Image (cartoon, rainbow, N blue to C red):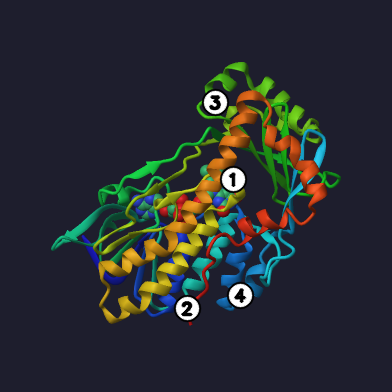
Protein backbone atom coordinates (compact mmCIF):
# COMPACT_ATOMS: atom_id res chain seq x y z
CA UNK A 1 0.00 0.00 0.00
CA UNK A 2 1.25 3.50 -0.87
CA UNK A 3 1.21 6.00 1.99
CA UNK A 4 1.17 9.80 1.71
CA UNK A 5 1.06 12.44 4.45
CA UNK A 6 -0.43 15.89 4.10
CA UNK A 7 -1.96 18.66 6.19
CA UNK A 8 -5.23 18.34 4.31
CA UNK A 9 -6.83 15.56 2.26
CA UNK A 10 -9.73 16.63 0.05
CA UNK A 11 -11.98 14.01 -1.51
CA UNK A 12 -13.82 15.11 -4.67
CA UNK A 13 -12.64 17.33 -7.52
CA UNK A 14 -15.94 19.15 -8.08
CA UNK A 15 -16.33 22.92 -7.57
CA UNK A 16 -16.10 22.66 -3.75
CA UNK A 17 -13.08 20.36 -3.65
CA UNK A 18 -11.14 21.99 -6.45
CA UNK A 19 -11.58 25.52 -5.06
CA UNK A 20 -10.71 24.33 -1.53
CA UNK A 21 -7.61 22.58 -2.93
CA UNK A 22 -6.46 25.68 -4.80
CA UNK A 23 -6.92 27.97 -1.78
CA UNK A 24 -5.35 25.59 0.73
CA UNK A 25 -2.28 25.02 -1.47
CA UNK A 26 -2.03 28.76 -2.12
CA UNK A 27 -1.94 29.30 1.66
CA UNK A 28 0.92 26.80 1.97
CA UNK A 29 -1.18 23.89 3.30
CA UNK A 30 0.13 20.62 1.86
CA UNK A 31 -2.97 19.22 0.18
CA UNK A 32 -3.77 15.91 -1.50
CA UNK A 33 -6.93 15.97 -3.63
CA UNK A 34 -8.47 12.64 -4.68
CA UNK A 35 -10.88 12.55 -7.64
CA UNK A 36 -12.37 9.22 -8.68
CA UNK A 37 -12.75 10.06 -12.37
CA UNK A 38 -9.94 10.40 -14.90
CA UNK A 39 -11.21 13.76 -16.19
CA UNK A 40 -13.88 16.37 -15.53
CA UNK A 41 -15.92 15.54 -18.62
CA UNK A 42 -19.34 14.79 -17.20
CA UNK A 43 -22.46 16.19 -18.73
CA UNK A 44 -24.77 16.27 -15.74
CA UNK A 45 -23.08 19.15 -13.99
CA UNK A 46 -24.40 22.69 -13.84
CA UNK A 47 -22.71 25.30 -15.98
CA UNK A 48 -23.26 28.56 -14.16
CA UNK A 49 -20.42 30.67 -12.76
CA UNK A 50 -22.08 33.40 -10.70
CA UNK A 51 -20.93 36.98 -10.10
CA UNK A 52 -19.85 36.09 -6.54
CA UNK A 53 -17.62 33.27 -7.87
CA UNK A 54 -16.24 35.64 -10.53
CA UNK A 55 -15.47 38.07 -7.70
CA UNK A 56 -13.37 35.35 -6.02
CA UNK A 57 -11.57 34.77 -9.33
CA UNK A 58 -10.82 38.51 -9.45
CA UNK A 59 -9.53 38.46 -5.86
CA UNK A 60 -7.24 35.59 -6.90
CA UNK A 61 -6.00 37.71 -9.84
CA UNK A 62 -7.36 35.12 -12.26
CA UNK A 63 -10.44 36.81 -13.68
CA UNK A 64 -8.94 37.96 -16.98
CA UNK A 65 -7.40 34.63 -17.89
CA UNK A 66 -10.53 32.82 -16.75
CA UNK A 67 -12.77 34.90 -18.98
CA UNK A 68 -10.55 34.10 -21.96
CA UNK A 69 -12.04 30.59 -21.92
CA UNK A 70 -15.12 30.21 -24.13
CA UNK A 71 -18.24 31.20 -22.23
CA UNK A 72 -21.51 33.08 -22.64
CA UNK A 73 -22.28 36.14 -20.49
CA UNK A 74 -25.89 36.43 -19.39
CA UNK A 75 -27.03 39.69 -17.78
CA UNK A 76 -30.70 38.82 -17.34
CA UNK A 77 -32.71 35.60 -17.12
CA UNK A 78 -36.06 35.44 -18.85
CA UNK A 79 -38.99 33.09 -18.46
CA UNK A 80 -41.59 32.38 -21.13
CA UNK A 81 -44.95 31.99 -19.40
CA UNK A 82 -47.29 30.71 -22.10
CA UNK A 83 -46.65 33.38 -24.71
CA UNK A 84 -45.48 36.16 -22.38
CA UNK A 85 -41.77 36.79 -21.97
CA UNK A 86 -40.92 37.97 -18.45
CA UNK A 87 -37.51 39.02 -17.13
CA UNK A 88 -37.17 37.17 -13.83
CA UNK A 89 -33.61 38.06 -12.78
CA UNK A 90 -31.47 41.09 -13.56
CA UNK A 91 -27.75 41.02 -12.69
CA UNK A 92 -26.84 44.41 -14.15
CA UNK A 93 -27.10 46.29 -10.82
CA UNK A 94 -24.97 44.00 -8.68
CA UNK A 95 -22.13 45.61 -6.70
CA UNK A 96 -19.59 43.26 -8.33
CA UNK A 97 -16.98 43.56 -11.08
CA UNK A 98 -18.91 41.15 -13.30
CA UNK A 99 -22.58 41.96 -13.63
CA UNK A 100 -23.40 38.73 -15.41
CA UNK A 101 -23.53 34.97 -14.95
CA UNK A 102 -20.89 33.23 -17.06
CA UNK A 103 -22.12 30.02 -18.66
CA UNK A 104 -19.15 27.73 -19.09
CA UNK A 105 -19.11 23.93 -19.25
CA UNK A 106 -18.16 22.81 -15.76
CA UNK A 107 -15.28 20.65 -17.04
CA UNK A 108 -13.62 23.85 -18.40
CA UNK A 109 -14.09 25.59 -15.06
CA UNK A 110 -12.64 22.62 -13.13
CA UNK A 111 -9.77 22.25 -15.62
CA UNK A 112 -8.96 25.91 -15.08
CA UNK A 113 -8.96 25.58 -11.27
CA UNK A 114 -6.83 22.42 -11.46
CA UNK A 115 -4.34 24.16 -13.76
CA UNK A 116 -4.04 27.10 -11.33
CA UNK A 117 -3.75 24.84 -8.28
CA UNK A 118 -0.97 22.79 -9.91
CA UNK A 119 1.23 25.90 -9.90
CA UNK A 120 1.57 25.49 -6.11
CA UNK A 121 4.07 22.85 -4.93
CA UNK A 122 1.80 22.10 -1.96
CA UNK A 123 -0.92 20.78 -4.29
CA UNK A 124 -1.03 17.09 -5.16
CA UNK A 125 -3.96 16.07 -7.40
CA UNK A 126 -4.56 12.33 -7.80
CA UNK A 127 -7.04 11.49 -10.56
CA UNK A 128 -8.73 8.07 -10.79
CA UNK A 129 -8.34 7.79 -7.01
CA UNK A 130 -11.55 6.66 -5.31
CA UNK A 131 -11.72 7.16 -1.54
CA UNK A 132 -13.45 4.22 0.10
CA UNK A 133 -12.74 4.25 3.84
CA UNK A 134 -11.81 6.70 6.57
CA UNK A 135 -8.69 6.19 8.64
CA UNK A 136 -9.55 6.60 12.31
CA UNK A 137 -6.90 7.06 14.99
CA UNK A 138 -7.43 7.98 18.65
CA UNK A 139 -11.15 8.75 18.06
CA UNK A 140 -10.19 11.23 15.36
CA UNK A 141 -10.53 10.95 11.59
CA UNK A 142 -6.96 10.93 10.32
CA UNK A 143 -7.29 10.46 6.54
CA UNK A 144 -8.68 8.07 3.93
CA UNK A 145 -7.96 4.83 2.13
CA UNK A 146 -8.47 4.92 -1.62
CA UNK A 147 -8.14 2.78 -4.73
CA UNK A 148 -5.82 4.40 -7.27
CA UNK A 149 -4.23 3.30 -10.58
CA UNK A 150 -1.13 2.30 -8.55
CA UNK A 151 -3.13 0.17 -6.13
CA UNK A 152 -4.27 0.94 -2.62
CA UNK A 153 -3.40 4.40 -1.31
CA UNK A 154 -3.56 5.71 2.24
CA UNK A 155 -3.55 9.46 2.78
CA UNK A 156 -2.92 10.59 6.36
CA UNK A 157 -3.98 14.15 7.11
CA UNK A 158 -4.83 16.46 10.00
CA UNK A 159 -8.04 17.39 8.19
CA UNK A 160 -10.10 15.37 5.72
CA UNK A 161 -12.57 17.41 3.67
CA UNK A 162 -15.46 15.49 2.11
CA UNK A 163 -16.33 17.35 -1.10
CA UNK A 164 -17.57 14.18 -2.76
CA UNK A 165 -21.00 15.46 -3.72
CA UNK A 166 -24.60 14.52 -3.04
CA UNK A 167 -23.89 10.78 -2.90
CA UNK A 168 -21.00 11.30 -0.46
CA UNK A 169 -19.54 8.00 0.69
CA UNK A 170 -17.31 9.69 3.25
CA UNK A 171 -20.10 11.38 5.17
CA UNK A 172 -21.81 8.01 5.40
CA UNK A 173 -18.57 6.43 6.69
CA UNK A 174 -18.38 9.25 9.25
CA UNK A 175 -21.90 8.39 10.45
CA UNK A 176 -23.45 11.63 9.19
CA UNK A 177 -26.95 11.31 7.74
CA UNK A 178 -28.60 14.06 5.71
CA UNK A 179 -32.16 15.22 6.44
CA UNK A 180 -34.14 14.92 3.18
CA UNK A 181 -36.25 18.00 2.41
CA UNK A 182 -37.95 16.59 -0.70
CA UNK A 183 -38.41 17.67 -4.31
CA UNK A 184 -41.52 17.20 -6.48
CA UNK A 185 -39.53 16.90 -9.70
CA UNK A 186 -36.73 15.23 -11.59
CA UNK A 187 -34.98 16.62 -14.66
CA UNK A 188 -34.41 15.07 -18.08
CA UNK A 189 -31.23 16.35 -19.68
CA UNK A 190 -30.84 16.36 -23.48
CA UNK A 191 -29.15 18.32 -26.28
CA UNK A 192 -30.58 19.83 -29.43
CA UNK A 193 -28.72 21.70 -32.16
CA UNK A 194 -28.69 25.49 -31.89
CA UNK A 195 -29.31 27.42 -35.12
CA UNK A 196 -28.12 30.94 -35.94
CA UNK A 197 -31.68 32.34 -36.11
CA UNK A 198 -32.81 30.86 -32.76
CA UNK A 199 -33.80 33.33 -30.03
CA UNK A 200 -30.68 34.27 -28.08
CA UNK A 201 -31.86 34.79 -24.53
CA UNK A 202 -31.50 32.02 -21.99
CA UNK A 203 -35.04 30.87 -21.42
CA UNK A 204 -37.21 28.98 -19.03
CA UNK A 205 -40.47 27.87 -20.62
CA UNK A 206 -43.68 27.13 -18.75
CA UNK A 207 -46.61 26.07 -20.91
CA UNK A 208 -49.60 23.74 -20.47
CA UNK A 209 -48.32 22.10 -17.32
CA UNK A 210 -44.83 21.54 -18.69
CA UNK A 211 -41.53 23.18 -17.78
CA UNK A 212 -38.32 23.29 -19.76
CA UNK A 213 -35.11 25.34 -19.49
CA UNK A 214 -32.67 25.95 -22.33
CA UNK A 215 -29.01 26.70 -21.69
CA UNK A 216 -27.08 28.22 -24.57
CA UNK A 217 -23.89 26.18 -25.07
CA UNK A 218 -22.84 27.84 -28.31
CA UNK A 219 -23.34 25.06 -30.86
CA UNK A 220 -26.23 23.40 -29.05
CA UNK A 221 -28.98 23.90 -26.50
CA UNK A 222 -28.60 22.00 -23.26
CA UNK A 223 -32.23 21.29 -22.46
CA UNK A 224 -33.61 20.53 -19.00
CA UNK A 225 -37.10 19.05 -19.22
CA UNK A 226 -38.77 18.94 -15.80
CA UNK A 227 -40.99 15.95 -14.94
CA UNK A 228 -42.95 14.99 -11.81
CA UNK A 229 -40.71 12.93 -9.54
CA UNK A 230 -40.65 9.25 -10.44
CA UNK A 231 -42.68 9.68 -13.67
CA UNK A 232 -40.00 8.72 -16.20
CA UNK A 233 -41.31 5.15 -16.71
CA UNK A 234 -44.77 6.50 -17.59
CA UNK A 235 -43.25 8.96 -20.06
CA UNK A 236 -41.13 6.23 -21.61
CA UNK A 237 -44.22 4.01 -21.87
CA UNK A 238 -45.86 6.63 -24.10
CA UNK A 239 -42.86 6.40 -26.45
CA UNK A 240 -40.16 8.69 -27.78
CA UNK A 241 -42.43 10.13 -30.50
CA UNK A 242 -44.87 11.41 -27.86
CA UNK A 243 -41.92 12.88 -25.92
CA UNK A 244 -40.70 14.71 -29.04
CA UNK A 245 -44.23 16.14 -29.39
CA UNK A 246 -44.12 17.42 -25.79
CA UNK A 247 -40.79 19.16 -26.45
CA UNK A 248 -42.13 20.78 -29.65
CA UNK A 249 -45.29 21.91 -27.87
CA UNK A 250 -43.44 23.63 -25.06
CA UNK A 251 -40.67 25.23 -27.19
CA UNK A 252 -42.13 25.50 -30.71
CA UNK A 253 -38.91 26.71 -32.39
CA UNK A 254 -37.31 23.34 -31.56
CA UNK A 255 -39.92 21.35 -33.51
CA UNK A 256 -37.75 21.26 -36.67
CA UNK A 257 -35.02 19.28 -34.83
CA UNK A 258 -36.72 17.10 -32.21
CA UNK A 259 -35.92 14.08 -34.45
CA UNK A 260 -32.39 14.45 -33.02
CA UNK A 261 -33.81 12.77 -29.90
CA UNK A 262 -33.34 9.34 -31.51
CA UNK A 263 -34.12 7.17 -28.48
CA UNK A 264 -34.26 7.29 -24.69
CA UNK A 265 -30.47 6.81 -24.75
CA UNK A 266 -30.28 10.50 -25.75
CA UNK A 267 -32.18 11.54 -22.61
CA UNK A 268 -30.48 11.39 -19.19
CA UNK A 269 -32.40 11.34 -15.93
CA UNK A 270 -31.09 13.62 -13.18
CA UNK A 271 -32.67 12.85 -9.85
CA UNK A 272 -33.25 16.05 -7.92
CA UNK A 273 -32.51 15.90 -4.20
CA UNK A 274 -32.59 18.61 -1.58
CA UNK A 275 -31.09 17.75 1.79
CA UNK A 276 -28.64 18.88 4.45
CA UNK A 277 -26.60 17.52 7.29
CA UNK A 278 -27.31 18.43 10.91
CA UNK A 279 -23.59 18.27 11.71
CA UNK A 280 -21.06 18.96 8.97
CA UNK A 281 -18.04 17.78 10.96
CA UNK A 282 -16.38 15.22 13.19
CA UNK A 283 -12.95 15.62 14.79
CA UNK A 284 -10.52 15.88 11.85
CA UNK A 285 -13.34 15.79 9.25
CA UNK A 286 -15.53 18.37 7.48
CA UNK A 287 -18.19 18.13 4.75
CA UNK A 288 -18.64 21.00 2.29
CA UNK A 289 -20.67 21.63 -0.90
CA UNK A 290 -23.32 19.10 -1.92
CA UNK A 291 -21.92 16.60 0.59
CA UNK A 292 -23.18 18.94 3.33
CA UNK A 293 -26.27 20.30 1.52
CA UNK A 294 -27.57 19.06 -1.86
CA UNK A 295 -29.33 21.94 -3.58
CA UNK A 296 -32.30 21.94 -5.93
CA UNK A 297 -31.36 23.05 -9.48
CA UNK A 298 -33.67 26.08 -9.04
CA UNK A 299 -31.62 29.23 -9.57
CA UNK A 300 -28.58 27.14 -10.52
CA UNK A 301 -26.88 28.08 -7.24
CA UNK A 302 -25.32 24.76 -6.16
CA UNK A 303 -21.90 25.47 -7.66
CA UNK A 304 -21.85 28.90 -6.14
CA UNK A 305 -22.65 27.65 -2.63
CA UNK A 306 -20.06 24.90 -3.00
CA UNK A 307 -17.43 27.52 -3.92
CA UNK A 308 -18.45 29.79 -1.03
CA UNK A 309 -18.11 26.88 1.43
CA UNK A 310 -14.63 26.20 0.06
CA UNK A 311 -13.59 29.85 0.47
CA UNK A 312 -14.89 29.98 4.05
CA UNK A 313 -13.17 26.69 4.93
CA UNK A 314 -9.83 27.86 3.52
CA UNK A 315 -10.13 31.30 5.17
CA UNK A 316 -10.91 29.82 8.56
CA UNK A 317 -8.75 26.69 8.60
CA UNK A 318 -5.63 27.21 6.48
CA UNK A 319 -3.56 29.06 9.09
CA UNK A 320 -4.61 26.53 11.76
CA UNK A 321 -3.50 23.67 9.52
CA UNK A 322 -0.14 25.28 8.85
CA UNK A 323 0.39 25.88 12.59
CA UNK A 324 -0.93 22.43 13.46
CA UNK A 325 -3.46 23.64 16.06
CA UNK A 326 -6.77 22.86 14.33
CA UNK A 327 -9.56 21.98 16.76
CA UNK A 328 -13.09 20.73 16.37
CA UNK A 329 -14.31 24.22 17.34
CA UNK A 330 -12.77 25.55 14.11
CA UNK A 331 -14.78 23.02 12.10
CA UNK A 332 -17.95 23.93 13.99
CA UNK A 333 -17.26 27.59 13.17
CA UNK A 334 -17.18 26.80 9.44
CA UNK A 335 -20.57 25.09 9.69
CA UNK A 336 -21.96 28.05 11.70
CA UNK A 337 -20.82 30.47 9.03
CA UNK A 338 -22.05 28.53 6.00
CA UNK A 339 -25.15 26.74 7.31
CA UNK A 340 -27.37 29.81 7.31
CA UNK A 341 -26.81 30.72 3.62
CA UNK A 342 -27.50 27.08 2.68
CA UNK A 343 -30.68 26.93 4.80
CA UNK A 344 -32.03 30.25 3.52
CA UNK A 345 -31.34 29.30 -0.11
CA UNK A 346 -32.99 25.90 0.35
CA UNK A 347 -36.01 27.56 2.00
CA UNK A 348 -36.45 29.74 -1.11
CA UNK A 349 -35.99 26.75 -3.42
CA UNK A 350 -38.54 24.70 -1.45
CA UNK A 351 -41.03 27.59 -1.65
CA UNK A 352 -40.64 27.76 -5.46
CA UNK A 353 -40.78 23.96 -5.74
CA UNK A 354 -44.04 23.86 -3.79
CA UNK A 355 -45.81 26.99 -4.97
CA UNK A 356 -44.76 27.03 -8.62
CA UNK A 357 -43.16 23.85 -9.96
CA UNK A 358 -45.29 21.39 -7.96
CA UNK A 359 -48.48 23.24 -8.94
CA UNK A 360 -47.56 23.49 -12.63
CA UNK A 361 -46.65 19.80 -12.82
CA UNK A 362 -49.67 18.57 -10.85
CA UNK A 363 -52.41 20.98 -11.93
CA UNK A 364 -51.09 22.61 -15.06
CA UNK A 365 -51.01 26.08 -13.50
CA UNK A 366 -49.59 28.05 -10.58
CA UNK A 367 -51.72 31.00 -9.41
CA UNK A 368 -48.56 32.90 -8.38
CA UNK A 369 -47.35 32.90 -11.98
CA UNK A 370 -50.52 34.53 -13.32
CA UNK A 371 -49.69 37.74 -11.48
CA UNK A 372 -45.98 37.72 -12.32
CA UNK A 373 -46.02 39.56 -15.71
CA UNK A 374 -48.17 42.39 -14.30
CA UNK A 375 -46.02 42.65 -11.17
CA UNK A 376 -42.84 42.90 -13.20
CA UNK A 377 -44.44 45.60 -15.39
CA UNK A 378 -45.57 47.67 -12.40
CA UNK A 379 -42.31 47.31 -10.49
CA UNK A 380 -39.53 47.09 -13.08
CA UNK A 381 -36.85 46.95 -10.36
CA UNK A 382 -38.24 43.64 -9.02
CA UNK A 383 -36.00 41.36 -11.16
CA UNK A 384 -33.02 42.89 -9.32
CA UNK A 385 -34.03 40.98 -6.16
CA UNK A 386 -33.78 37.48 -7.69
CA UNK A 387 -30.71 38.83 -9.52
CA UNK A 388 -29.08 39.49 -6.17
CA UNK A 389 -30.21 36.23 -4.57
CA UNK A 390 -29.01 34.16 -7.52
CA UNK A 391 -25.95 36.22 -8.46
CA UNK A 392 -24.54 36.86 -4.99
CA UNK A 393 -26.55 34.70 -2.61
CA UNK A 394 -26.67 35.12 1.15
CA UNK A 395 -23.35 36.02 2.78
CA UNK A 396 -20.95 36.06 -0.18
CA UNK A 397 -17.41 35.19 0.92
CA UNK A 398 -14.19 37.04 0.12
CA UNK A 399 -10.63 35.78 0.26
CA UNK A 400 -8.88 36.43 3.55
CA UNK A 401 -5.78 38.51 2.97
C1 LIG B 1 -30.32 18.66 -12.65
C2 LIG B 1 -29.32 19.51 -11.96
C3 LIG B 1 -28.92 20.69 -12.56
C4 LIG B 1 -28.06 21.55 -11.89
N1 LIG B 1 -27.73 22.72 -12.48
C5 LIG B 1 -26.94 23.58 -11.82
C6 LIG B 1 -26.57 24.82 -12.40
O1 LIG B 1 -26.93 25.15 -13.54
N2 LIG B 1 -25.78 25.65 -11.67
C7 LIG B 1 -25.35 25.31 -10.42
O2 LIG B 1 -24.68 26.12 -9.77
N3 LIG B 1 -25.64 24.14 -9.87
C8 LIG B 1 -26.41 23.26 -10.54
N4 LIG B 1 -26.69 22.06 -9.97
C9 LIG B 1 -26.09 21.70 -8.67
C10 LIG B 1 -24.57 21.49 -8.82
O3 LIG B 1 -24.30 20.53 -9.82
C11 LIG B 1 -23.97 21.05 -7.48
O4 LIG B 1 -24.53 21.80 -6.42
C12 LIG B 1 -22.44 21.26 -7.46
O5 LIG B 1 -21.84 20.55 -8.51
C13 LIG B 1 -21.88 20.80 -6.12
O6 LIG B 1 -20.48 20.81 -6.14
P1 LIG B 1 -19.63 19.84 -5.20
O7 LIG B 1 -18.22 20.12 -5.51
O8 LIG B 1 -20.11 19.93 -3.81
O9 LIG B 1 -20.04 18.36 -5.68
P2 LIG B 1 -19.92 17.66 -7.11
O10 LIG B 1 -19.97 18.65 -8.21
O11 LIG B 1 -20.93 16.57 -7.11
O12 LIG B 1 -18.47 17.03 -7.11
C14 LIG B 1 -18.16 15.89 -6.35
C15 LIG B 1 -16.90 15.28 -6.94
O13 LIG B 1 -16.47 14.24 -6.09
C16 LIG B 1 -16.06 13.13 -6.88
N5 LIG B 1 -16.21 11.94 -6.00
C17 LIG B 1 -17.35 11.42 -5.52
N6 LIG B 1 -17.10 10.37 -4.73
C18 LIG B 1 -15.75 10.24 -4.70
C19 LIG B 1 -14.88 9.32 -4.03
N7 LIG B 1 -15.34 8.35 -3.24
N8 LIG B 1 -13.55 9.46 -4.22
C20 LIG B 1 -13.05 10.43 -5.04
N9 LIG B 1 -13.85 11.32 -5.69
C21 LIG B 1 -15.18 11.23 -5.51
C22 LIG B 1 -17.01 13.16 -8.05
O14 LIG B 1 -16.49 12.46 -9.16
C23 LIG B 1 -17.11 14.66 -8.32
O15 LIG B 1 -16.11 15.11 -9.19
C24 LIG B 1 -27.56 21.19 -10.62
C25 LIG B 1 -27.91 19.98 -10.04
C26 LIG B 1 -28.80 19.15 -10.70
C27 LIG B 1 -29.20 17.86 -10.05
Of residue 40 and residue 368, the one placed in the foreground of this image is 368
The mark that comes first in sequence, 1 or 3, is 3
Dot 1 corresponds to which residue? Answer: 298
Crowd around label 2: few <14 · some 14–19 · many ≥20 (10 Å):
few
Quadrant of the rendered image containing residue 336: bottom left
Dot 3 corresponds to which residue? Answer: 232
| Image position, residue 293 (x, y; %) | 43, 50
Instruction: Please tell me whether residue 90 is drawn above or below residue 114 in the rendered image.
Output: above
Dot 4 corresponds to which residue? Answer: 58
The mark that comes first in sequence, 1 or 2, is 1
Looking at mark 4, is its residue's CB closer than 8 Å to ligand 1?
Answer: no
Per the model, the C-alpha gap separating discs 2 and 4 is 13 Å
Q: Measuring 61% from the left and 67% from the top, which residue is drawn there?
A: 54
Per the model, the C-alpha gap separating discs 1 and 3 is 20 Å
Per the model, the C-alpha gap separating discs 2 and 3 is 46 Å
The mark that comes first in sequence, 2 or 4, is 4
The mark that comes first in sequence, 4 or 1, is 4
Per the model, the C-alpha gap separating discs 3 and 4 is 42 Å
Q: Which mark is residue 400?
A: 2
Amino acid sequence: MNRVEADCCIVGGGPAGMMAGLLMARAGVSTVLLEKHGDFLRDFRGDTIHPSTLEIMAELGLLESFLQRPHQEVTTLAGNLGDTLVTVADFTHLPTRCKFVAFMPQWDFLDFLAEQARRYPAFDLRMRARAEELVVQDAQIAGVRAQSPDGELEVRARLTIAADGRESVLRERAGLDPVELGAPMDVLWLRLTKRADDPHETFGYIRDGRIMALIDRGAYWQCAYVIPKGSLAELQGAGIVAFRRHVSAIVPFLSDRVEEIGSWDDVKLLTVRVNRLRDWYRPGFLCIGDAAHAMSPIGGVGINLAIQDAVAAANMLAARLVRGDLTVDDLRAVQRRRERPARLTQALQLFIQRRIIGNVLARGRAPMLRRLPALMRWFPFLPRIPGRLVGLGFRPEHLAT
